[in-house]
Image: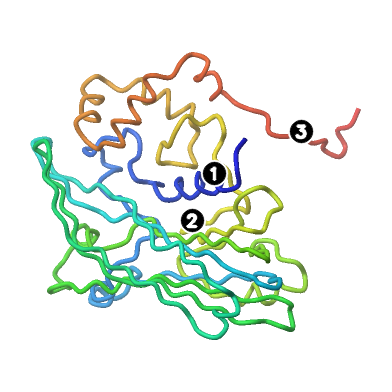
Amino acid sequence: MTTSRQLVDAVADAVLYEGYLLYPYRHSAVKNQVRWTFGVVHPRCWSEATGGAEPWSLEAGCLLRPLVGCRLQVSVRFLHLLQRGGAEGSWQEASERTVGPRDLGLQELFQSPVSLPIDLPAAVLEEGGVRREWHAVEGKVEVEAQPLPAAGAALVEVRLANTTPLDDPGTLTRDQVMLSSLASAHAVLWVESGEFVSSADPPPELRTAVGQLRRRGWWPVLVGDPGAGDCLLMSPIILDDYPRVAEESPGDLFDATEIDELLTLRILTLSEAEKAELRQGDERARRLLERTESLTPAELMRLHGAVRELRVRRGWER
C-alpha cells in the first residue's frame, strides 16, 4: 500500500529532476545544452552584478489552520551541481542535498523566526578515471510565522537564499556560476495538529488572505492523499493540488509532463551509437536506458493507457 510519505516523495523527486536531461538524453543534443531552468537560486553577488535578471532567493507563503500543539516539519531540497571530467568529456551532473528536516513549534515561530544555514564545502573525487568537482555553496533557509486570529489561521513563510561569495562575479557565465547555485530547489512542509489551506482553491473566508501571500519562484501546492492537508510542497513548477506520478510509470524520464509510452518507444529506437553515448555518459541516463531496455511486453502494455475515473456529461445520458 502506498503511504502518504511515498506519494509526496515521488512528486518531490519528479520536481527535483524535472529537465535534468531530456530526450534523446545525450549531452551532445541541442536541447541538453541549456539545463537547470526550474527553481535555480544563484549567488546573490552574481545575480546583482548581472542586473538581477536571475534570482538569488526564492520564497512563498502559505496558510494553515492550527490546532493546539501545532508543529511543523520543514525541509528544503535542491541539486548541488558538480563538474565531471574524464576520457568521455566534461559536463555537469548533480548531487541531491537536503536542509533539514527541522521540527518547529508554531507558537515558537510566532515569537522568533528560524534560520537554517547552508554550508556545502568544496570537494573533489577521482575514481575510475573520472574526476568530479563540487564548488562550495553558502546560503540559508528562513522560516517565520504569524497568527491571523481574525481568519482563524496562521501565515507561514519560507525563504531560500544563496549567499555564496564569488571572485569577479560579473565576469562569469551562467554555466560557470551554476556550480555555485542551487538547482530545482523546493520546500516540503508537514504539519501536525493542523492542516494547510489550498492556495489554488481556498475557502471563501480565506480567499483575500491567500491572494495577499508572497510568492517568488515557488508555488504552494497540497500533496499526498486527495483531501489531506498535512503536507505542502513549495514547488518551482505550478502544479494542481494533489499531483501524482502515474503508477504505471517504471521510472523517472526527467520530464514529468511527457507520456511515458511515447518516450519509452523513442528511447528503444535510438541508434547503437546514441545508446553507446548514453552508457558512457551520465550515470542516471545510463540507468534509464538499462531500465527501458529491460521492460517486459506486459510492462510496455501497462504504459498504453489507464482509466482513472468515469464521469457522466450532462446531456449525454441515455
Q: Is residue 213 left or right of residue 48?
A: right
Disc 2 to disc 3, C-alpha distance: 28 Å
Few, some or many C-alpha atoms within 10 Å of disc 2 (few <14, some 14-19, many ≥20)? some
- Residue drawn 35% across the image and 39% down it: 22
Q: Residue furthest bottom?
A: 111
Q: Is residue 76 above or below residue 246?
A: below
What amino acid does circle 3 point to? Leu
The residue identified by callout 1 is 6
Q: Residue under circle 3?
A: 310
| Mark 2 vs mark 1, CA separation in Å | 20 Å
Quick one: label 2 or label 1, which is nearer the N terminus? 1
Q: Quick check: 17 left or right of 212?
A: left
Picture quadrant of residue 20? top left
The residue indicated by pointer 2 is 237
Q: Give the foreground label among 2 and 1.
A: 1
Q: Quadrant of the C terminus?
A: top right
The answer to which quarter of the image holds residue 228 is bottom right
SS of the residue under disc 2: loop
